[in-house]
Amino acid sequence: MARRLPGLLLLLWPLLLLPPPPAAPANLGPSARPAFRRLGTLGPRGSPGRRPAPAAPTGAPYSWAGQPGGARSTGFCKSRPLDLVFIIDSSRSVRPSEFTKVKTFVSRIIDTLDIGEANTRVAVVNYASTVKIEFQLQTHSDKQSLKKAVGRITPLSTGTMSGLAIQTAMEEAFTVEAGARGPSSNIPKVAIIVTDGRPQDQVNEVAARARASGIELYAVGVGRADMESLKMIASEPLDEHVFYVETYGVIEKLSSRFQETFCAVDACMLGTHQCQHVCVSDGDGKHHCECSQGYSLNADKKTCSAIDKCALNTHGCEQICVNDRTGSYHCECYEGYTLNQDRKTCSAQDQCASGTHGCQHICVSDRAGSHHCECYEGYTLKGDKKTCSAIEEARRLISTEDACGCEGTLAFQDKVSSYLQRLNTKIDDILEKLQANEYGQIRR
């Protein structure tokens, strides 16, 4: 029955991919909640263990679950650069065939990574009662040489000194001299420890020091592995950093889990970026938003606003700048001017030549892009400044007006003349009387 168990697990594998059961009731204490993930249990995902999985894009929802080979098969994933150290148990309890499966597990994870000096670097620490660094982070810079080096690793076969192995990795593998990148690089330091037994030394304190130094620890337990020790080793949260499989026969399946964990999701391709206009991938799962021409990025770094180029005075229009709804602009000209072919400068418009002047006789273009009307000889411009009248007709009108004025004057003159005549007659009478009176006085 024991020999058929791996085959049975493979038959039950689709069932294991079902979502996890509902959370434990509230009255259960922390100790009642399993702080590890069994193979096939879907837990939180993200970049090493901490970033949540991206939301599915609108329309056709995207799910990581059930994808052969993990997220990479979608084309949306690029592994983050890491300094990654495998710490593998090769004690006596691990049979040669089982150790081969551990090496296959390591090689499959390597296959999912972007290996290189500027990308992910990999080292392997082999341990039992003694510890051996098989190769350092700076030793191999390509997948093929890495996988060949992994294939050459042989078991040490005695003891399980997990604490010593973690300490060796911390003090000798995760150093700048050994190929690790310094703190200023912001490259995560990650260790994956694989064991099937109970540590024969103390792991609690050394694991705590490793985590405090910035190393993120994942613990993979197989078969008889001690769960409490795995929890002591792993980083928080435990349900993202502790894995368990029943046998070495299925350990290689965990490679897809780690691929998802180390995946830098391209939010631009997934459509989860929330950029209003343009999403630009920066690599390593990062992105930034940009705006279409004529727009500027708002303070939220996601939405865009139309640029008022007319207000910025960068439009180049000679006369009038007009903003368009698209965030662009166009140039216009004052009345009497037309826009030149460069769509920016203006030329005076010859309304006389275009026939839009409205002059009855003659249109004269002015330098200001305007015009005025004149009349043919013998005509004069009317008050509307456009139409003309003949000069003889004007004279007739003036004569008629003068005649009307003369009649009034003559009547007035006749009236005054008649009055003056009567006045003169009276004066003559008075003078005669005065003369007669004067003559009579002289004779006396």
Image: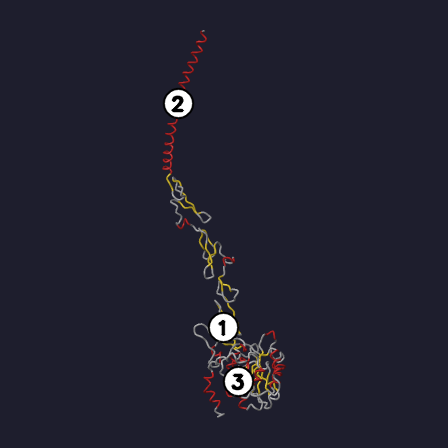
Asked whether 308 or 15 is in front, the reply is 15
Query: Closer to the camera, 211 or 363?
Result: 211
Q: Secondary structure at mark 2?
A: helix
Classify mark 1: residues with Cα within 10 Å, few (<14), some (14-19) or many (20+): many
Residue, disc 1: 267
Residue 71, given in percent of the width and then of the height, sits at 49, 78
Looking at the image, residue 208 sits to the left or right of residue 328; the answer is: right
State the mark number for residue 106: none
CB contact under 8 Å: marks 3 and 2: no
- Place of residue 189 in the rendered image (x, y in percent of width and height, measured from the top left): 58, 78
Residue annotated with mark 2: 419
Which disc, if any, is residue 244?
3
Spatial distance from mark 1 to mark 2, Cα to Cα? 115 Å
Crowd tier of the residue under label 3, counting other residues whose Cα lies within 10 Å: few below 14, some 14–19, many 20 or above: many
Q: Pick whichever of labels 3 and 1 is earlier in the sequence.
A: 3
Q: Amino acid at mark 3?
A: Tyr
For the residues carrying marks 3 and 1, which lies nearer the camera in this image? 3
Q: Are marks 1 and 2 in contact (CB under 8 Å)?
A: no
Disc number lying in front (3 or 2): 3
The structure residue drawn at horizontal position 46% and vertical position 89%, both measured from the top left corner, is 8
Q: Is residue 390 above or below residue 238?
A: above
Residue kind at label 2, given as amino acid type: Tyr
- Relative to 87, 56 lies left or right: left
